[in-house]
Amino acid sequence: MSRKLSLVIAWACLCLLVIAPMAALYFLLRLDEFADLAKANIGLPIQWWTVSDGQWYSLWVLTAVYLSIGLAGLFFLRRAFANFANGELFNLSNSRDLRRFSVLLVAQALAMPLHLSLSSVLLSLNHPAGERMLSISIGSNELKVIGVALILWVMSDLLVEGGRLHAENQQFI
């Protein structure tokens, strides 16, 4: 069962690694739809009629950079789960891939408040003086993700050390 689930996770990661850049490219080409999506998801009192195309493109770049952190993490997660599906459970490569995933997960969770802050500044640049905004928000979701990622990081470090000890013990036998 775990091999099948590992294969499903590996394929899901691969699908996201293919679909996300295609969606990003779609929204780059259809900037008006990206703007509509941003308006629906950003809960800030932005004067939307003042936002220029340059600001929308800048927000797209900022969002693409933020999402690329998560996609890099998915790349390493996919590699580890593809190996799990092939029966390669406890090797140094899998442990390192899981560590890289957890580090990138922490980085993305920490980048979320920064992304929101930069987005609020970017989108309110055209507001009159005194109405520009800087929104800083850290919620329980980010704290949960950081907590889970730190647990994964510690577990992957233990697996890396176990892999090193296993390799060292194999040299003596």
Image (spheres, rainbow, N blue to C red):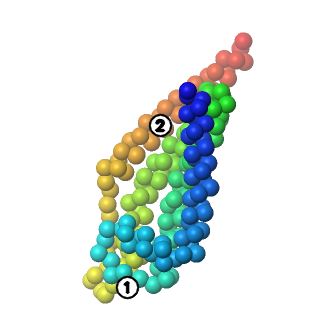
Q: Within 10 angstroms of label 1, few (less than 14), some, or many (20 or more) residues?
A: few
| In the image, residue 168 above or below residue 43 | above
Residue found at the very far left of the displayed protein = 130
Judged by depth in the image, the label closer to the viewer, 1 or 2, is: 1
Q: Nearer the viewer, residue 85 or 111?
A: 85
What amino acid is found at the position of numbered circle 1 in the picture?
Answer: Trp
**Residue 46 visible in the shown view:** yes
Q: Nearer the viewer, residue 26 or 103?
A: 26
Give SS at disc 1: helix
The numbered mark at residue 126 is: none
Q: Quadrant of residue 36?
A: bottom left
The residue under label 2 is 152
Q: Within 10 angstroms of label 2, few (less than 14), some, or many (20 or more) residues?
A: many
| Residue 22 located left or right of residue 49 | right
Give SS at disc 2: helix
| Residue at 31 percent of width and 71 percent of height | 44
Question: In which quadrant is the C terminus drawn?
Answer: top right
| In the image, residue 145 above or below residue 45 | above
The numbered mark at residue 49 is: 1
| In the image, residue 107 above or below residue 2 | below
